[in-house]
Image (cartoon, rainbow, N blue to C red):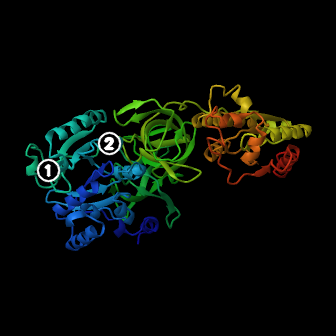
Amino acid sequence: MNPISAAYQAVFGSPEAARPCERPPALRILTCGAVDDGKSTLLGRLLFEAGAVPEDQLVALAADSRRYGTSNGEIDYSLLTDGLEAERERNITIDVAYRYMSTARRDFIIADTPGHEQYTANMATGASQCEVGIILVDAIRGLQQQTFRHAAICSILGIRHVVLAVNKMDAVGFSQEHFRRIYETFAPVAAQLKLDVVAIPISARRGDNVVVASRSLAWYAGATLLEHLERVEIAQADSSIGLRLPIQGVSRTSEGVRLYMGTIATGTLSLRERVRVAVGGAEAVVERLVGVEGPVDQAGPGAAVAVTLTPETDLGRGDLLHTDADAPACSNHFSAQVIWFGERPLFAGRDYELRLGTYTSPVTVTAIRGKLDIVSGLRVAATEVTRDEIAICHLATPGLIAFDSYEHCRATGSFLLIDRVTGETVAAGMVRNALDRGSNLFAQKLTVDRRAREELLDQKGAVLWFTGLSGAGKSTIADALERKLHARRKLTILLDGDNIRLGLNRDLGFTEGDRVENLRRVAEVARLMVDAGLIVLCSFISPFAADRAMVRERLEGTPFLELFVDAPIEICEHRDPKGLYAKARRGEIRNFTGISSSYERPAAPDLVLDSSRYEADELADRVVRLLVERGIAT
């Protein structure tokens, strides 16, 4: 076997696993809409009437229909797609179910997606690969908020062709007026979202207008659902998009030459072609080009390839190769549409992990520029984004990254946001455009740096972060610690929560969003002071683990100690040195930590200071000992 092919298969597997399908690409269809609008029933009926259900599966379907309680012995076609036991028992779709169907005219891949709001992430996952969307509406209930949300997601994810399938027409007497009112309400929103909509009245349970035209809907002269799906024309992908080859892995040939592997997202790659690394601009020529079955002269979209370059270039996972014909954007700041899945709201200033193709990077949401009013299709002002809402955000990464707009290239324009504390996926994003902010700014190299200042002061700069409930004793212990360090001739600065809010952060309140911004500013100030060689003592409640992680991330490379001042809330409330707990109990203070807002205890602090058992001076001595052990103080 060719040594390059052998190295390739070690990463990607055997050629048989990746051999392309000989049939033309199937039309990928999304079914969505509010819960109980009949998506699974419609899909089951469509599969049945198109002859796509094997005989043995029909026998099992009849038995399952009796088991799960359908009336009058009718077949429950939704059971063909609701495969999970929990879905069948609760009569809802949770997972994304895929079905395959062929007619004389076309092949289809159909995704049945969830209707419940809490499964919007699953719906977006199904929509991301589809070309046509079927949005169902219950003719009895009419348009729901989830109907509009799914329409917005279709638009954002690039689905332009939408069928508004008004289901359960039999329940409203096949009323043309009823159908017209639903369509006329939906049409303006669809126009705002730039959707090409065809409305079809159907009854999925009875089969009206699904495959065969309904006599009960004689006033409707259009195509049935299947006829429309067979005829709809999908614009071909823009062939002018240049090469995008995200590097997935790096290996070496038997000769020791670096072998770069990945799947071509767009464009073509040819042997001896000159390519460029998106970030950095290094150029090289493709010396060898290998597919899954061996060397090739050219490879196109979807092909898994391995290449060697001349001159040999230092690339790693996440790098992107392109040709000069159509270069991607390179920036550290970009605008994107974000579909938020997180349980906790999104606020500007929070840090996440960005996963864009094969590239991974820390990222900060720097601004929320508005969110989508899903009923009107218009953008409205917002300072926070809650679960299942869609927003336009600005995001920034520490270094330059390569990307395209989602509209230009889905593979290099879509991303996920990961909560760095919990590891959960909290958002899906679609890049809109690069932002110029900061693109012409470069860090100035200074002659007198942090190390020089530390030598002058004969100490190490560090940040000591005191966290705990109000009244736990953070400021008292920090003050005692500063006195002890001052006695050791160490230069310190104490940033206290109240003092900062009386000056620098006077404009901020106590909403969760303002708390995020409060700590972001403090972290930046602390970083500047550490660069000056100071030992910075920060006393802040900082109740949320995500925000403390954000502070630690912004101070990367700086000695950082998280000190948890632990005291039961009963003791803190009994002390109540500022009378705040009493006001909170009377409802005079909103979002008060411990009363109307939660406090997340640190999972692994550097030191726990139990202020309910020990005096401030004794606890301060413990911190001094820790600083000596870490080489920060002598």
Label 2 Cα crowd, 10 Å radius (few <14 / some 14-19 / many 20+):
some
Q: Earlier in the sequence, mark 1 or mark 2?
A: 2
Return the x and y of residue 593 as percentages of the image width and height: 66, 41
- The residue that disc 1 covers is 224
Relative depth, front residue between 446 and 541: 541
Return the x and y of residue 527 as percentages of the image width and height: 70, 37
Relative depth, front residue between 428 and 95: 95
**49 on left or right of 245:** left
- For badge 1, the amino acid type reads Thr
Q: Is residue 18 above or below residue 503?
A: below
Q: Is residue 464 visible?
A: no
Return the x and y of residue 265 as percentages of the image width and height: 37, 51
Q: Nearer the viewer, mark 1 or mark 2?
A: 2
Query: Dot 1 lies on which element?
Result: loop
- The image quadrant of residue 413 is top left
Q: How far, Cα to Cα, is label 1 from label 2?
A: 24 Å
Instruction: Give the residue displayed 28% in from the left and 52% down from the top.
Output: 31
Instruction: Give the residue displayed 22% in from the left and 35% down from the top.
Output: 184
- The image quadrant of residue 515 is top right
- The residue that disc 2 covers is 144
Query: Dot 2 lies on which element?
Result: loop
Residue extending farthest front = 586
Q: Is residue 255 visible?
A: yes
Relative depth, front residue between 190 and 472: 472
